[in-house]
C-alpha cells in the first residue's frame, strides 16, 4: 500500500486556507470601511475590523462543529509578524537627525513612550493587585496592560504566553487571551480617543481637510518609489525578492543570536533561565531591529569601500513589507482570542477596568505632555503618541494623517527615531516584567519600583520646567 502525501489532502491546503481567510477578512473589512461612513470616521484600521469579523465567523462556525483555524498558526503569525515588520522598518535607508532641537524632541518622545509604559504598569498592577484580594484574580496580570496598550498584539501575546506558563506563580489560565483582549480594546480606545480629540480640533478650527479618502491622496512619483543608485526593478533576481530576502535573513540572524544566548542562560539556570530568557525571546522584534542596524552598517561600510556598487534596499518596498506584516499580525492576533476565557467573572471585570482606566490615563497624560513638551505641534504629537500608546505605530500614523497629511511636522519622524531611547530607558521595566509573576510579594515590589521609575521619567521629561523654576527660586 502506498503511503505519503496527496495534493488533495486537507493538510496540504490548511495553511493556505487559514492565510486566505485572514486576508479575505481584511479585504472585506476594508470594503465595509469604505461603504459605511461612521465606520470610516471611527479611524479603526481595516485589519482590526477584519480581525473581529474573522473572530466572529470563527466562533459561529465552531458552534456548527467547523474548525477553520489552528490556534497555533494564528499565534505563530502574531509572534513573527511583529518581528518581521520591525526588521523591515529598521532596514530602511534613513537620513540622520542633525539639529539639536530635533534630537531633543526625539529624546523627549522616547521618554514619553517609556513613561507611559510605566504609567500603564502602575495603573494595571494597582487594579489587579486590589482585585486579587476581592475576586482572587491573578495579581500580576496588570503588567499586560503596557504590553497590550503600549506594545500592541505581538507583545500582548508574547507576555500573555509567558505569564500563562509561569512556574513560580499559579498559572494565569487564559493569559494569552487576556493580553490579546487588552490589545484589541487598545485599537478601539485609539479610535475613540482619536475621534474625540479630532472633534475638539475641528470645533476650534485646527483640523485640516481629511486625506484618508484614497481619492484625495497624492499620486506617487518615481522618486517616491525608487532612487537612481538602487538596483534595477527586474534583473535575474526581482527587486522585491531581494527586499524580502534581506528581511528574512536578518530575522534568521536574530534567531541565531537569541539561540546562542539561550544556550548560556540554560547553563546558568535559575533566574537567568526563568526570567531573562523569556524576555529575550519575547522581545524578538528588538533583537531583530539590532541585527537590522548591524546589517545597515555593514552595507554602508561595503559601499564606502566600493565592494557594493549599488543600494540594494528600497524604502518603498520595505514599507510595504512592514505594512503587510503588521496588518497580518493584527488580524491574526484578534482572531486568536479565546472568548471562552471571558466567561469567568474574575477575568472580564479586571479586563474591563484595565482597558477603560488605561485609555483615560493615557489620553490625559499624553495630552499634558504634548501641550507642555511639544508646544509647536502639540496636536500632531498627541495624535501620533496616543495612537502609538494604545495601538501600534500604524495606528499613530493613521491619526497623525488627519492633522498632518504631508507629515510636515516632526511628529512622524519622532516615532521612528525614538526607538533607541525607548529601548535604553525601558529596559528596567522589561526586567520587572519577568519578576512580577514570581510571587505576591514580588508583585507588590514591582508596583513600588514602577512608581519610582515613573516619577524619575516625569522629572527627566519635564526637566526644563523644573530647572527653570529652581533657578528662579534661587
Image (cartoon, rainbow, N blue to C red):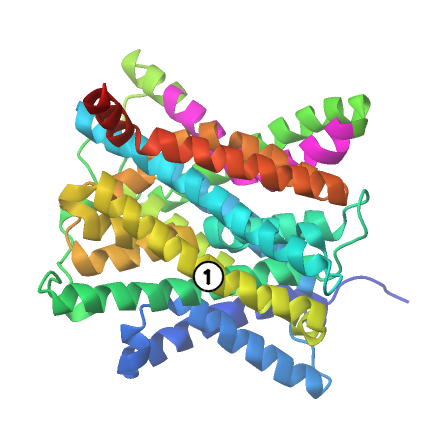
Q: Residue 272 in magenta?
A: yes
Instruction: In the displayed orientation, state which residue is furthest to the bottom.
Output: 64
Residue 290 lies, with reference to residue 143, above or below; the image says above
Q: Who is closer to the viewer here, 260 or 140?
A: 140
Q: Residue at x 40, y 73 (%)?
A: 27
In-front residue for pair 256/233: 256
Q: Which residues are magenta?
A: 271-297
Res 99 quadrant in image:
top left
Above or below, 32 against 369 in this view is below
Q: Residues within 10 Å of mark 1 (few under 14, many from 20)?
A: many
Q: Residue 93's spot in the image, x, y percent?
A: 29, 33
**Residue 217 in the image: x percent, y percent?**
15, 62
Residue carrying label 1: 186
Asked whether, in this view, residue 247 is left or right of residue 73, the answer is left
Q: What kind of secondary structure does the magenta stretch mostly adopt?
A: helix
Residue at figure coordinates x 40%, y 30% from the top left = 420
- Residue in view at x 81 percent, y 52 percent: 170
Amino acid at each position: 500500500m502506498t503511503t505519503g502525501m496527496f495534493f488533495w489532502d486537507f493538510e496540504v491546503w490548511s495553511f493556505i486556507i487559514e492565510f486566505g481567510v485572514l486576508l479575505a477578512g481584511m479585504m472585506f473589512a476594508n470594503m465595509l470601511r469604505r461603504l459605511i461612513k461612521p465606520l470610516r470616521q471611527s479611524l479603526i484600521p481595516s485589519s482590526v475590523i477584519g480581525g473581529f469579523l474573522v473572530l466572529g465567523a470563527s466562533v459561529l462556525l465552531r458552534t456548527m462543529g467547523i474548525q477553520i483555524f489552528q490556534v497555533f498558526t494564528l499565534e505563530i503569525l502574531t509572534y513573527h509578524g511583529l518581528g518581521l515588520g520591525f526588521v523591515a522598518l529598521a532596514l530602511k535607508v534613513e537620513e540622520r537627525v542633525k539639529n539639536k532641537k530635533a534630537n531633543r524632541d526625539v529624546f523627549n518622545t522616547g521618554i514619553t513612550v517609556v513613561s507611559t509604559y510605566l504609567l500603564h504598569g502602575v495603573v494595571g498592577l494597582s487594579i489587579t493587585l486590589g482585585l486579587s484580594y476581592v475576586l482572587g484574580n491573578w495579581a500580576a496580570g496588570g503588567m499586560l496592560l503596557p504590553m497590550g496598550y503600549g506594545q500592541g498584539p505581538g507583545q500582548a501575546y508574547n507576555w500573555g504566553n509567558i505569564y500563562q506558563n509561569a512556574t513560580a506563580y499559579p498559572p494565569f489560565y487564559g493569559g494569552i487571551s487576556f493580553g490579546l483582549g487588552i490589545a484589541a480594546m487598545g485599537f478601539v480606545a485609539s479610535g475613540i480617543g482619536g475621534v474625540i480629540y479630532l472633534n475638539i480640533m475641528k470645533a476650534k478650527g485646527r483640523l485640516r481637510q481629511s486625506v484618508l479618502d484614497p481619492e484625495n491622496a497624492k499620486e506617487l512619483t518615481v522618486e517616491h518609489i525608487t532612487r537612481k543608485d538602487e538596483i534595477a526593478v527586474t534583473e535575474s533576481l526581482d527587486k522585491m525578492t531581494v527586499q524580502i530576502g534581506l528581511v528574512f535573513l536578518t530575522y534568521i540572524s536574530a534567531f541565531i543570536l537569541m539561540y546562542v544566548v539561550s544556550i548560556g542562560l540554560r547553563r546558568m539556570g535559575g533566574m537567568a533561565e526563568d526570567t531573562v530568557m523569556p524576555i529575550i525571546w519575547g522581545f524578538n522584534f528588538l533583537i531583530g531591529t539590532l541585527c537590522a542596524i548591524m546589517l545597515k552598517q555593514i552595507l554602508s561600510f561595503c559601499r564606502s569601500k566600493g565592494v557594493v556598487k549599488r543600494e540594494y534596499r528600497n524604502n518603498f518596498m520595505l514599507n510595504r513589507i512592514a505594512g503587510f506584516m503588521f496588518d497580518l499580525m493584527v488580524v491574526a492576533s484578534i482572531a486568536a482570542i479565546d472568548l471562552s476565557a471571558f466567561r469567568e467573572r474574575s477575568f472580564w471585570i479586571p479586563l474591563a477596568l484595565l482597558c477603560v482606566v488605561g485609555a483615560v490615563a493615557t489620553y490625559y497624560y499624553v495630552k499634558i505632555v504634548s501641550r507642555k513638551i511639544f508646544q509647536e505641534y502639540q496636536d500632531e504629537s498627541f495624535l501620533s503618541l496616543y495612537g502609538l500608546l494604545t495601538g501600534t505605530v500604524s495606528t499613530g500614523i493613521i491619526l497623525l494623517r488627519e492633522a498632518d497629511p504631508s507629515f510636515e511636522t516632526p511628529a512622524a519622524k519622532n516615532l521612528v527615531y525614538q526607538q533607541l531611547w525607548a529601548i535604553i530607558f525601558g529596559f528596567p521595566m522589561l526586567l520587572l516584567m519577568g519578576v512580577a509573576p514570581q510571587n505576591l510579594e514580588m508583585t507588590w515590589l514591582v508596583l513600588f519600583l514602577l512608581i519610582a521609575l515613573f516619577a524619575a521619567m516625569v522629572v527627566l521629561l519635564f526637566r526644563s520646567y523644573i530647572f527653570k523654576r529652581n533657578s528662579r527660586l534661587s
